[in-house]
Amino acid sequence: MSGARPEHGRPSDPCVMVIYGASGDLTKRKLLPALINLARAKLLNRHFAVIGMARAPLTSEAFRDKLTEDMREFATLPVEPQVWDWFRERIHYLPGDVKDAEAYGRLRDLLERVDREHGTRGNHFYYLAVAPTFFGEVARQLGAAGLLAEDEGRWRRIIIEKPFGRDLESARALNAELSAVLREGQIYRIDHYLGKETVQNIMVFRFGNAIFEPIWNRRYIDHVQITAAETVGMEGRGGYYEEAGALRDMVPNHLFQLVSLTAMEPPVSFGADAVRDEQAKVLRAVQPLSPEEVLTRTVRGQYNGGVLDGERVPAYRTERNVAPGSTTETYVALKLTIDNWRWADVPFYLRTGKRLPTRVTEIAIQFRRVPFILFRDTPVDHLTTNRLVIRIQPDEGISLRFGAKVPGPVMTVGPVNMDFAYADYFKTAPSTGYERLLYDCMIGDATLFQRADMVEAGWEVVSPLLDVWKALPPRNFPNYPAGSWGPREAEELLERDGRHWRTIDE
């Protein structure tokens, strides 16, 4: 492997990546394929190594053999033999339990050996692919073993997956646990949505193009819709989902990240804290809902059996590890307002759910109508409003809808779409969405990771919903069939404001 500087971006720092829970799906489906893609792009330092840690009693050689088979199935592109040979000799495995203090001592010894063998200079980052209940425990044990101390130019970082707590109180408790042994600058709270190219492009689109930023405000924008729809059901994760639900699983992390990037003010630079300062301001400006507003501005749903892609699919309550009378929501829609100068009186409508008709994540910016008076003596009886759609997944791109005259002797206006797709304009290799995030951690750029105050600000908005929904269990679950766009109440949420959810295939 070459450590030469690529055309765009520098190679990552020399380092060791320690993966807790390395025998799980995340390692083989996302993390190793992402690392291989970084190596292929010459963004991974030649002084690099991986240590997998889990309870399974494997040897390093057995772990390497397992990953060799896994990469044949899960790598985004066929792995060149020389690339995999280079990787294979840098993969190590250590059996151990996250609660076993002696395992951290063995890890310390292994890290010292790996640093010597691979020239990784004592730089370590720990990826916690374990249950959230163990985040604080692992951090505490690492600190006690001296594995988080930074000295002599060496850095130590920790990556944790969402959920970052299950409510405001637990999020604050987790942040306190982490901050007891780590500086905030060492903590990387990962949200794989932010690895999407289009999410990263929101700032470039807004702040790098003079034609959009002047109209990105309440004077020109009528409302914003953010949709994160999934076709899948539980896929064996019923136990987790029973504890989380759609609200906890998606809103305070994924959807609020999209809200903050859409609504933030221009940062003074693209430095991590400058960007996150502006994101935090947006989240703090979101108006928390009163108990009465929770009843009128939010909708929850749970899917029943139905037809999806021509096949019958079961109801949520019949999924494995789900209670027969479960009141867990699989769908959420809500109306939020941001109380600042740019966005006052512009509603943000959010929706997310399982077993919806199509898999899509997008941000739709609906602009205000133009005055109709110009067309009063023409056959035109309806004007198409301008709409900008930023597609996050699965087909990343941006489209703009505007009105144009239909050819012919009569004044008729029809909608026209200008569409940009990443796959058409840029030759991009298939990715997992984790490449940018892992690379940024290795070079110390925390821009795309959540800060403690952002996490807590998100939970402050969500907490009133959790409280009201706990006090008033739903009486009409299940209330939408699989394959539909959710409960009827979600449509009524916008109809009361004279609006409607956009049809995704428009």
Image: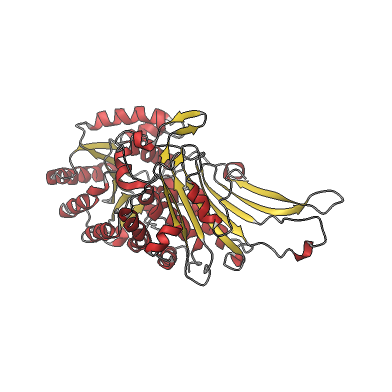
Please indicate, yes or no, whether residue 390 appears anywhere in the rendered image: yes
Looking at the image, residue 95 sits to the left or right of residue 209; the answer is left
Identified at 40% across, 35% down, the residue is 315
Quadrant of the drawing holding the N terminus: top left
- Of residues 428 and 56, which is closer to you in this image? 56
Looking at the image, residue 64 sits to the left or right of residue 99; the answer is right
Image coords of residue 128 (percent x, y):
28, 46
User: In terms of image quadrants, where is residue 421?
Assistant: top right
Image coords of residue 256 (percent x, y):
43, 57
User: In terms of image quadrants, where is residue 365?
Assistant: bottom right
Q: Is residue 374 above or below residue 239?
A: below
Identified at 55% across, 42% down, the residue is 395
Farthest left residue in view: 102
Farthest front residue in view: 475
Image coords of residue 383 (percent x, y):
71, 56
Image coords of residue 154 (percent x, y):
27, 56
Quadrant of the drawing holding the C terminus: top right
Please indicate, yes or no, whether residue 195 appears anywhere in the rendered image: no
Q: Is residue 147 above or below residue 24?
A: below
Identified at 40% across, 63% down, the residue is 292
